[in-house]
Amino acid sequence: IGRLAGKDGKTKFTIENATRTRIMLADTRIHILGSFQNIRVARDALCSLILGSPASKVYSKLRSTCARSNDS
């Protein structure tokens, strides 16, 4: 959970803003609220973090994914 929240909630906040979702970390569960497409992008980012990817790599992937979705 600490890895997903980040320092002062920065990681969670960044993913929420980039994907326009709300992420709730409750004990061992993670709840993501938003549109289907945005939830999928946020879930992929969270899964990458859980599997050990560095936060900077996840952020850059989020930026490229969001830029691609904004262009269409």
Image (spheres, helix red, strand yellow):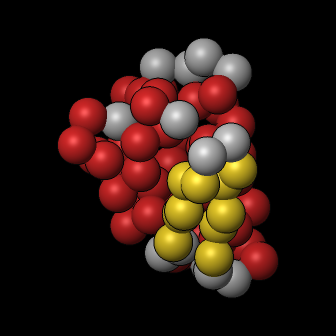
Q: Residue at x 38, y 67 (%)?
A: 17
Apparent side of residue 20 relative to residue 33 in the rendered image (left or right): left
Question: What residue occupies the far front of the structure in this picture?
Answer: 27
Q: Is residue 34 left or right of residue 11?
A: right
Residue farthest toward the bottom in the current orientation of the protein: 35
Q: Give percent across and percent down for residue 43.
A: 70, 52
Q: Which of 14/6 is in front?
A: 6
- Judging depth in this view, the residue of 54 and 9 nearest the camera is 9
User: In which quadrant will I find the C terminus?
Assistant: bottom right
- In x, y percent, where is residue 37? 73, 73
Residue 34 appears in the rendering: yes
Quarter of the rendering containing residue 6 = top left
Whether residue 48 is situated above or below residue 37 in the rendered picture: above
What residue is rendered at 53% in x and 73% in y?
Answer: 21
- Residue at x 66% of width, y 54% of height: 30
Task: Indicate left or right for 25 with 59 as reference.
Answer: right
User: Is residue 67 in view?
Assistant: no
Q: Is residue 44 above or below residue 56?
A: below
Q: Position of residue 14 (x, y in %)?
A: 35, 54
- In this orientation, which residue lies closer to the viewer: 56 or 4? 4
Total count of labels: 0
Does 20 sit above or below residue 32? below
